Image (cartoon, helix red, strand yellow):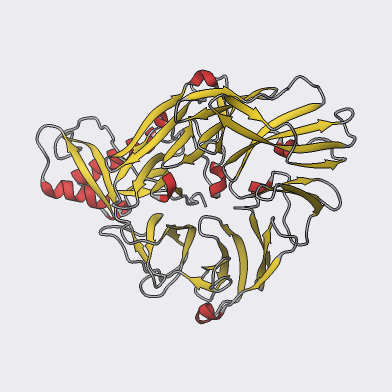
Amino acid sequence: MKKILCFLSLGMLLVACNGGSKGVDNGSVKGIIVKKAGIEGASTLAIAAPAQGVKSVSFTKADGGSGENALYKVSADNKFIEVSYTFNVEVEGDAPDKTVIETIKRNINIVPNFIYSIGGGDWLWLANCFMDVPNYREMPEDGAKKILTRIRDEFNEKYHDTHGAHYLINKVNGAMYQWEQADGAPAGLSDGYNPPSMLDDWFVTLGSDMYVREGGYNFLSAEEGTPSGRVLRVRFSSAGPVFTEVIPASQGVSRLLPGENCLGLTCGQGSNIGYYVYTPSDGRIQAIPLDQTHQNIRWTVISVDNKLYALKNNQEGNLEGGPHSVGFYEITVAKDGVKIGSAPIAETYSHMGLYDEIMNGWVCTTPTYAFFEDGSPVKVHIFDSVNKTLSSGDMPDHYPYSAGGVRSRYFEGIAYEADGDAGFWICDLSKSEAEYVPLDKSGIASYNISSMVMEHFEAGNMTMKYRCATPNGDVYAFATVKGANRGKLAVITGDDGSAGYIINVLLNL
């Protein structure tokens, strides 16, 4: 299914429309502006859609809503409440009848694909949004429906190539603001399940400000119209977000790396990469002094727990193999320049060829940074930034490994490996053993579940998502992986207790 949720921020939405004959396609209606999302009081948000073939599905619906592909608040007793939106209708010349305006407001819905928590946790980003008219087929064929058709189709066509529009939402009052590509919104964020770690290296929060690399996770390209590599600051206020360019396109930024009151910058691509530091306090961009002239030494810069480190990959032979070392060096940013420590604070040796996984710049949000070495068994190397140690050993039992890197399987240094429908292992890279948690099914016994299959780890809510087969169709149960209730399965229901729908993503606020 296309929808996978990210909590996104909704913003101001404006759709221009062509004129038409009054009463048929009333040209006086220019477009609509999304002003607010009714998220007040929510502790958890979800994006969901009723499952096909389920006869009895009940939701607490917003006024005029259908409950399909919608954004929901989750109540304290695990019930869905559909989020309603406040719209303004823009008109030119004579305003249409009030009934027409109210019909338009009541029948427009926002269909998101992702939701993220951003801006230090005070804002939401609602991404890959399209416009929908949920009760479209049941509406009478009148002027209001024709206006709705025009507004919906023009909006969806406008944002078709970028996989939808983007909005920023103030979590305090639900005020929404549209986020355009010119202000750093991603140029074509792909659909599908994307964990929050996908935002690493192009979407960084420093203090109360957010910094984004134009184009999002799409790398630079020589093709006309592709992201330029400039960096924008997003500053949030009660009046809404303010977007300011702080690093020009000429710098060619390809990755952002959060540091202590600064940003590390990876600039360029391929063999033509340079590393810099940007300090917001004075706007300076300074080169990180890395000697890239030795053919058997490669340097890169990474961010671990919001601190910058230089990694030196020292090959003691040819580049095809042989023992070599990887050392972590501290980076110091001062008024008189950027400096690299004279000796590594931690170092390891290996017979692996090159650590390609770590040699392209990386962001790790936790104090423990890990990288893997292929083999039988797989080796894991763990850098502890607090104690400044680097340990190496065999990959522990049950710990998942992916050649795509740590963040493809781990969130905040932790992964969860399912044991069928019996339980799961908590795999913490800072520990040497996996911890087993059995599932407690007592809370879902009334659903008469015949089988359960784990679908994925819900990173935004730190839960395991299971598809459960019941006599009335599939339901989706969630087990938290942290806290006092970890392992206890729960089903989020409609107001009549039914659960025949698909929950794409849950996000704790």
Image x and y of residue 398, in percent: 74, 62
Image x and y of residue 209, in percent: 42, 39
**358 or 445: nearer the eye?**
358
**22 or 432: nearer the eye?**
432
Image x and y of residue 332, in percent: 61, 33
Residue at (53% x, 20% y) in the render: 251
Residue at (28% x, 36% y) in the render: 14
**Residue 420 shows in this picture:** no
Question: Left of 419 or right of it: where is 68?
Answer: left
Question: Left of 165 or right of it: where is 373?
Answer: right
**Residue 15 shows in this picture:** yes
Image x and y of residue 452, in percent: 61, 70
Give the answer, above or below, for where 455 lies relative to 380: below
Question: Left of 240 or right of it: where is 376?
Answer: right
Quadrant in which the C terminus appears: bottom left
Give the answer, above or below, for where 9 lies relative to 461: above
